[in-house]
Amino acid sequence: TRLDFSNEYNANSIHAQGDAYFIEQVRELTDGEVDITLHTGGALGFKSGDHFYAVADNAVQIADTLSGTMSGIDPIFLLSSLPFLVDGVDEARQLYEIARPYYDEVFEDNDQVLLYASPWPASGIWSREAVTSSESLQNLKIRTFDRNGTETLRNAGAAPVSLSWADVVPQLATGGINAVLTSAEAGANASFWEHQQHFSGIQYAIPLNMVHMNRNAFESLSSDQQEALREAARRTDEHNWQAVRERTVSNYGTLEENGVSIHDPVSADFQQALSEAASPVISGWQDDMGERGQEILETFHNGQTP
Amino acid sequence: MIGWLATLSRGLNRLAAGVAILLILYMFGHIILEIVLRLFGHSTFILDEYIGYAVAAMTFLGLPYVLEKNGLIRVALVLDRLPGKWHWPLELLIAVTSFAAFGWLSLFWWQNVVRSYQRGITSDTLAETPLWVPEGIVLLGLWLLCFTLVVRSLQLVTKRSRHTHPAQ
Amino acid sequence: MDMVWIAIGVAALLITVLAMGTWVFAALVIAAMGSLWWLGGFELDRIGLIFSRILYRAGNSWELSAIPLFILMGELIFRSNVSERLFKGLTPLTRPLPGGVLHTNVFGCALFAAVSGSSAATTATIGKITSRELANRGYDRDLSIGSLAGAGSLGLLIPPSIVMIVYGVQAEVSISKLFMAGVIPGLLIALLYSGFIILRSMLKPHLAPRQTGSEVGIWQALTLLTPVVALITIVIGSIYSGIATPSEAAAVGVAATLGLLALERQLTLPMLLDALKGTLISATMVCSLLVTAMLLSTAMGYLHLPRELAAWIAAQQFTPMALLMALAVFYIVLGLFLDGISITVMSLPITLPIVILAGFDPLWFGVFLVIMVELGQITPPVGFNLFVLQGMTGENIGRVAWASAPFFLLMCLAAALISVWPQIALWLPTLLAS
Ligand code: NA
Ligand code: NA
C-alpha cells in the first residue's frame, strides 16, 4: 500500500524527522508492505491549515499539522499553545496525555485517526536587547505566531505585530521589529543571531503538532498492518518527546556557539507578570471549551495522570 | 434565449470585475494602513489573512470577465493553421473541456463551502473569520466562469462559427 | 524506468491540451487532473477533492498581492508621461553605447529587482514602462522582448527574493547571506545581457537604430530622470529602513506613484479607472496562471515524479562536477513545467544532502538553484515571463520563447561561471560577515 504524508516543515525540522522515524518504524513492522512517502516543505501544495479537511476527505492520507491552525474547527486545538500553562516538557507531556482522549474524539468525529503528537521546543523571546523584565517588554515590537500570543503580550505591555514568517528575517535585519516570539530551534534555523543577540527562555508554551490519518485509509489496511501503524505511532510519540528534550539542549548549544546570550530561567517576578498577562487568555479559552476545558485543566492542576 | 443568457453572463461578469477592482484598491489601502500603524507600534493583526482572501477573490472574480474580454493567453498554433470551418468545433471542444474541469472542481468546492458554513468553521486568527465567506467568493467566481463557458459553448453551437477570433 | 514514461505522459498531455488552443490557465488544470487520473490511477472524486482545495489555497496567498499592486504601479506610469521623460533623459546619456536605450530593459529590471521579489511582477512592470517607448523608437522587437524576459527573471536573484526565502527556510541557510550572495551573480547576468545587446547592435546596427532628433543637454537629461529615480529611491528606502516589508513594497510603490502624479497634476479619475481596469486584466491573467500552475505541481507531487528523478540522480555516484551537470539538466527539465517554489520544495529533500555530501556550500547552491529556477521562467511550455510578455505584446509564445533563447543561453553561461568560480557568489557574504 502506498500512502502520501503531507508536512509543511523542512526535512531537518524536528517534525519531519519524527515523521521519517514513524515511516521507518512502519516499514520495519510491516516488512515494507505499507510504503509511506513524506512530502516535506508543503510540496503537495497543502499548508497546515488545509490538512484537517484534506485528511478527512482523503485528499491526502496522513498529515502533520500545527495544532493551533485547527483552532477554528475546535478550540481544543489551542490547548497546547496556551501561554504559561506548562513549565516544561514533563508537564507538556502530562497535559497531552490528559487531553489525548479529547483529541481522539475530535479526529474520530471527522473520519480520522490521531496517530501521534510532535512537540515543538519551548517558545521564548528572541530579541536585540535583553528581555528579562516587564519593563524591557514595554512597547517592544515583537512578532507573535497566534492570537493567544498577541493577546498575552499586549496584556503584558508589548506591541505585538503579525507578520508572515517570510517577512520576519527582512524585518529583523532592517529593525522593523525588535523581537520574535518563537522557539530557539526556529530562530536557529533562520540564523536569527545575525540580528538578535538574546534569547529569553520564558517557557511560553510547548505547542504540539498532530499527525492524523484518514480513517478509511487506515481501516482499509489489514488488521496486522493497522496494529503495526498503531505500534509505530506509539514508538514515535515516545521518540518525539525524547527528541524535543535533546533538541532544546542542542539548540542552546548552537545559540551559545553563535554568541547569543541565553536568559533561562528568567526572574520569578518577570515570570509571574507574564503568567498574569496570560490568565485572561486561559480563562477565555476555558469559556470557549465549556465542560471539556474544565475537566482537562482540573485534572492537570490536580497533578493526576490519566 | 441564448442572447438573453449572454447578456446576463456579461452583466454578472462586469459586476464581478467591478468588485475585483475594489479589492485591488482595498489591498493597497490595508497594506498602507498596516505600515502606518506599525510605525506607531500598532497592527491590524489580520493583514496577511485578509490580503490572502482578497488576492484569491480578485483572481477568481476577475477571471470570467477577462476570459470574455480575450485577456487570457492561449497558444493558437493549431487554430491558426486550421481551415475556417473547423474552428468552431475545436473552440467548442476547448470550451467544453474547460467547463468540465472547472465544473467538476466547483462541485467539490461547493461541498466544502457548505461544510464550512454548517459547522461554523472560522479562521485560526484574531478575526475568527467564518471561512465560508472567502471560500464562497471563490466559489462564486468559479460558477461565473462555468456560466461564461456554457454561454460560449451554446453560442458556438448555434452560430456554427468561430465565436471570437483568438486574441493572438 | 517507470518515471520516465510518467514524465513523458504528463508532458504529452500538457502539450496536447495547450496546442489545441486551450487557455493556458485551463490547460494547466486539465493537464493536472488528467495526469492524476490517467497516470496516477486516482479516482475522479479524489481528484476533485484535492484540486478544489489546492485551487483555493494557491490563490489565497498574501505574497501574491505584490503582483496586482506592482502592475498597478506600471499601469499608472504607463499612462503618465513619466516613462516618456525617462527615455528622453536616457537617450543622450546612452548615445555612445551601442544598443542605446535598449539597455533600459536590463538595468531597469536589475534595479526593479531590488524592490520586487518575483520575476512576473518585475517583467510586467518594467515591460509596461519600456516596451511602448522602445517600439516607438524603432528598436528590434525580438531583442526588446528577449532582453525583458531574461532580465525580468533577475527579480528572483537580486534581493529581496521569494524563492531565496523558501530555499533559506528549507535548507536552513541564512536568508540575509543568501540575499547578499545573489547580488554579484545578478549584476553579472545583467552585464552579460548588456554585452550581448552591444554585440548584436554592433553587428546589426538596424536592430538598435541610433537615436536622433531633439537634443537635450546633460543637465536637462538628468532632470528628466528625476521622477523615476525618486520613485525607486522611495520604494528601496522603505524596505531598507524597515518601514515596509518586501511584500509590502508594492503598496509603497503605488502610493509613491500616485503621489508623484498628483504633484505633477497628471492624475485624473478617468486615467485612474483606466489604469485599474488594465491592472485587473493583467493581474488576473498572471495570478490565475500562478494559481493553476500549482495544480500541476501538486499532480507531480502525487505522482512522486520530481523526488524519484532526484533519487535516481542521487543513486548514480556522480563526481561533483558531473553531479552538478546532472542537476542542471534535472532542474532545466523541471523548469519547463513547474514554478520555482515548487521545484525548490519538491527537490531539496533529496538534492540538498547529495550536494552537501559532494562538498558544495549550501549557500552557494542556493544561488545556483535560483539561477536554475530563473531559467525555467523563460522556457516553454510553462514560463511565467513568457506568459507575461505574450499577454503584454500579443506575440505568440513561440516567438517570445525564441526571442528569449539567447538570454537563456547567457544565463546558462552565468551558471557555468559561478560553478567554476564559486567566489562570484560567496565573496560578498564572506566579506560582510567578517
Ligand atoms: Na528581487
Ligand atoms: Na518553463
Image (tube, rainbow, N blue to C red):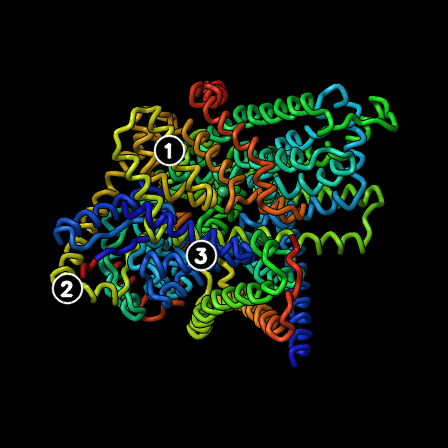
C101 on left or right of C63? right
How far from the left and from the top, in percent, is residue B110?
Answer: 47, 71
Label 3 residue near ligand 2, CB within 8 Å: no
Q: Which residue is mark 3?
A: C31
Is residue C89 among the parts visible in the rendering?
Answer: yes
Closer-to-camera residue (C172/A153): C172
Callouts 1 and 2 close, C-beta under 8 Å: no
How far from the left and from the top, in percent, is residue A130?
Answer: 44, 33
Q: Nearer the viewer, mark 1 or mark 2?
A: 1
Could you tell me the amino acid type at mark 2? Answer: Ser
**Res. B154 image quadrant:** bottom right
Q: Earlier in the sequence, mark 3 or mark 1?
A: 3
Q: Residues within 10 Å of mark 1 (few under 14, many from 20)?
A: some
Q: Which residue is mark 2?
A: A222
Q: Residue at x 49, y 63 (%)?
A: B128
Please, which chain is the residue tagged with disc 1 on? C
Could you tell me the amino acid type at mark 3? Answer: Ala
Is residue A266 among the parts visible in the rendering?
Answer: no
- Residue that sits furthest to the right in the current view: C214
Q: Which residue is mark 1?
A: C327
CA separation in Å, label 3 and label 1: 25 Å
Q: Secondary structure at mark 2?
A: loop
**Res. B60 image quadrant:** bottom right
